[in-house]
Structures are given as structure tokens and as C-alpha cells.
Image: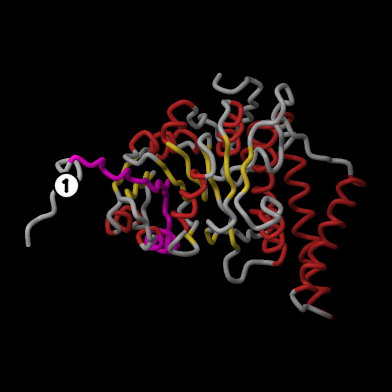
């Protein structure tokens, strides 16, 4: 059989590749699932798999290589959420770079093609992202939160475009400023103008703010889903909420309510929402009572962690470290404008 002449030698424009980029450290069994799902994508473009490993000791490097990934080794002390993703984007050969985390498993073989289709909706689209779906066995507060949060972004079930608000309106906290690099894609050209900032947390939401401020649009595609959820134990849940509260304060200046009355009413509302969700699933009797108790503990721990995290500037560094799931002792507010 005569070898096929390469497109460039036939005078044709080569097909642009797309890169899937994943930061990894001790990815465990879920990394194998994630990489296998990436390799199973149905795509009419070449796919590059790029992994940045920061000191894995569980065989994650070997798993990545077995799936044909190009591997970048980085010192664990040099890892940062924004900086490491900038490193991946800079090494990427693709004109589009899709980001996953090591435990975000594409839900089907069309995940990547659906993300890429979002860029066809308008010429100024720089970011496209999709939803998380809960893992089998996820708790009901986690299932409800994911369903309602991502459902609110596309009530009609179709891809939605977001652009910046009126000039001078300032950054917004909510749907318009939301983006996730656990399931998101960007054009490398836009990243060249507006890279990730070297932020310790919420680097993806900060990127969305900066992209919108630069005049780009972003798209939410409800069908480009990954399987991605976490159920933490009580202490880890508090610490995770602390990190989230601190990150939102650093990026958006958000200060969570700390008053016992308002916090109590908020927890009560969330418990009611969970119970309504359980009833819709067919739960009754003792299952509702037990579910309500679990919800009350879950949302109370999150409320306390969130309130404390959003006031991390008032805490000693040693106490911040103790309260943080990531063990981070700093508070790094972003009072500057985009691109500073």
C-alpha cells in the first residue's frame, strides 16, 4: 500500500490539533479512568494529551505514559493552580486547550467535540465549559447542588453565551463570572493575551473575569459533561469550605455572612431544598429524617468554614494553615485590575 501523502505536501492546510491538559499528583485509579475516557473521544482532529506531574509516587507517571501522554515533570514546590496551567498551555501544540483535573472523567465519547462546538457560536468565544455530574453514590446535598447550579446556567438546556456586563459595572460573582478548569476549554490565541494568573485558588474564575474584561465571550455547554464530585468527611468539608470562602474573598472581595441568625436561616433553607430533592427522588419516612440530619450537618459545617475563610485576613498564618484543606497559610487579595 502506498503511504498517504501528508496534507502539507498536497498543498492542503494541516488539520489543527486540540490538546487535553491535566495537572496530576498521585491520581490513583480515577486517573486511569480519566485518561482512558480522553483517549476514547470521537474527534475529527488530532488529539494531544499533555500531563504535568508534580511528584507522584503512586505510578501516575507510568499510567500517563501508557496512555501516550507527553509528560512534564515539575517540582511539587513549584506547583500552583494558575502557574502550572500556564506551563501546560505554553507547551500545548493545539489551537484549543481543554483542561481536566485528574479525577474529572469525561461522561461520554463526545465530551470534547461538544466543548469545541461552543467556539462555533461566535467569533469572540475564548472559553467553553461544561457541567459536573455526581459520581455514583454521591450524597444528596452534593447531587442537588450540582444539579441546580449547572441547571441554572442553561435553563432551556441549550449552550449559553456570556459576555461582560455594562462598562463600569465591576466584576460579578455568579453565573457570568463562573468558569471551571476541571472541565473547560480555551483558545490558545486568547490565552496568549490573557493567561492564568499565578493565583493560589479560584484561578479559573479569575481567568473568566479577565477574559470577559478583555472583550472575549464564554460559553456554557450543558451536554459537555464530566463525572466529578467530592464527598468529604466533616473536618475535610469544613476545610474545603474555608478554602473556597478565602478564594472567593481574594478574587471577588466576597464576605460571607457570619451572623448566627442569617447563617441559621440560610442553613434551614438549604436543608428544606435537600428534603424537597429527596422527596422528588421518592424518599419518605425515616430516610427523610436521616437525610435532613445529614443535610443540617453538611450545610452548617460549610457555612462556618465559608464565613471563617472569607475572613482569613484576620487570622494568623498558622491558623489559616490548620483550617485549610490545602494547608495554605497565606491570604492574597487581588485588588488590582485585570492584567496587572
Residue 93, by quadrant, is top left
Can I make out residue 217 in this image?
yes
Estimate the x, y position of residue 88 in percent, counting from the top left: 38, 39
Estimate the x, y position of residue 126 in percent, counting from the top left: 51, 37
Task: State the residue position of label 1.
Answer: 6
Say left or right for 259 vs 335. Answer: right
Estimate the x, y position of residue 338 in percent, counting from the top left: 59, 23
> Which residue is the extreme one toward the left?
2
Instruction: Say if the magenta span includes residue 74.
Output: no
> Which residue is the extreme one toward the bottom?
285
Residue 309, placed above or below residue 283: above
Can I make out residue 201 in this image?
no
Q: Residues within 10 Å of mark 1 (few under 14, many from 20)?
A: few
Question: Residue placed at 13% from the left, 54% from the top?
Answer: 4
Say left or right for 167 vs 8. Answer: right
Estimate the x, y position of residue 1 in percent, counting from the top left: 7, 62
Residue 12, by quadrant, is top left
> Which residue is the extreme one toward the right?
261
Location of the C terminus (image quadrant): top right
Question: Residue placed at 39% from the left, 48% from the top?
Answer: 20
Instruction: Say if the magenta span includes residue 26.
Output: yes
Nearest the viewer among 74 and 234 is 74
Residue 61, placed above or below residue 210: below
Region in magenta = 11-37
Say left or right for 132 vs 14. Answer: right
Q: How is the image coloured?
A: secondary structure
Residue 261, placed above or below residue 315: below
Question: Residue placed at 45% from the left, 60% from the top?
Answer: 110
Local secondary structure at mark 1: loop
Amino acid at each position: 500500500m502506498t503511504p498517504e501523502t501528508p496534507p502539507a505536501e498536497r498543498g492542503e492546510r494541516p488539520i489543527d490539533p486540540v490538546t487535553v491538559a491535566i495537572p496530576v499528583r498521585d491520581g490513583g485509579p480515577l486517573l486511569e479512568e480519566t485518561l482512558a475516557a480522553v483517549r476514547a473521544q470521537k474527534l475529527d482532529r488530532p488529539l494531544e494529551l499533555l500531563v504535568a506531574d508534580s511528584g507522584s509516587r503512586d505510578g501516575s507517571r507510568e499510567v500517563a505514559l501508557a496512555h501516550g501522554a507527553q509528560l512534564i515533570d515539575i517540582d511539587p514546590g513549584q506547583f500552583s493552580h494558575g502557574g502550572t496551567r500556564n506551563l501546560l498551555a505554553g507547551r500545548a501544540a493545539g489551537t484549543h486547550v481543554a483542561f481536566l483535573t485528574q479525577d474529572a472523567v469525561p461522561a461520554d465519547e463526545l465530551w470534547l467535540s461538544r466543548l469545541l462546538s461552543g467556539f462555533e457560536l461566535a467569533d469572540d468565544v475564548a472559553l467553553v465549559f461544561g457541567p459536573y455530574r455526581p459520581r455514583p453514590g454521591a450524597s444528596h446535598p452534593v447531587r442537588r447542588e450540582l444539579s441546580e447550579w449547572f441547571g441554572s446556567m442553561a435553563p432551556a438546556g441549550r449552550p449559553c453565551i456570556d459576555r461582560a456586563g455594562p462598562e463600569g459595572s465591576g466584576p460579578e460573582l455568579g453565573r457570568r463570572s463562573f468558569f471551571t478548569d476541571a472541565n473547560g476549554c480555551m483558545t490558545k490565541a486568547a490565552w496568549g493575551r490573557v493567561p492564568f494568573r499565578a493565583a493560589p485558588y479560584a484561578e479559573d474564575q479569575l481567568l473568566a473575569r479577565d477574559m470577559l474584561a478583555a472583550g472575549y465571550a464564554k460559553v456554557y455547554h450543558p451536554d459537555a459533561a464530566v463525572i466529578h464530585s467530592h464527598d468529604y468527611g466533616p473536618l475535610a468539608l469544613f476545610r474545603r469550605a474555608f478554602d473556597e470562602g478565602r478564594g472567593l474573598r481574594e478574587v471577588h472581595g466576597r464576605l460571607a455572612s457570619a451572623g448566627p441568625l442569617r447563617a441559621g436561616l440560610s442553613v434551614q433553607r438549604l436543608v428544606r431544598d435537600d428534603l424537597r430533592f429527596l422527596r422528588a427522588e421518592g424518599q419518605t419516612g425515616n430516610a427523610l429524617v436521616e437525610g435532613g440530619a445529614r443535610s443540617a450537618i453538611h450545610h452548617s459545617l460549610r457555612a462556618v468554614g465559608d464565613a471563617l475563610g472569607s475572613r482569613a485576613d484576620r487570622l494568623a498564618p498558622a491558623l489559616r494553615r490548620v483550617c485549610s484543606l490545602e494547608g495554605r497559610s497565606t491570604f492574597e487579595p487581588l485588588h488590582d485590575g485585570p492584567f496587572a
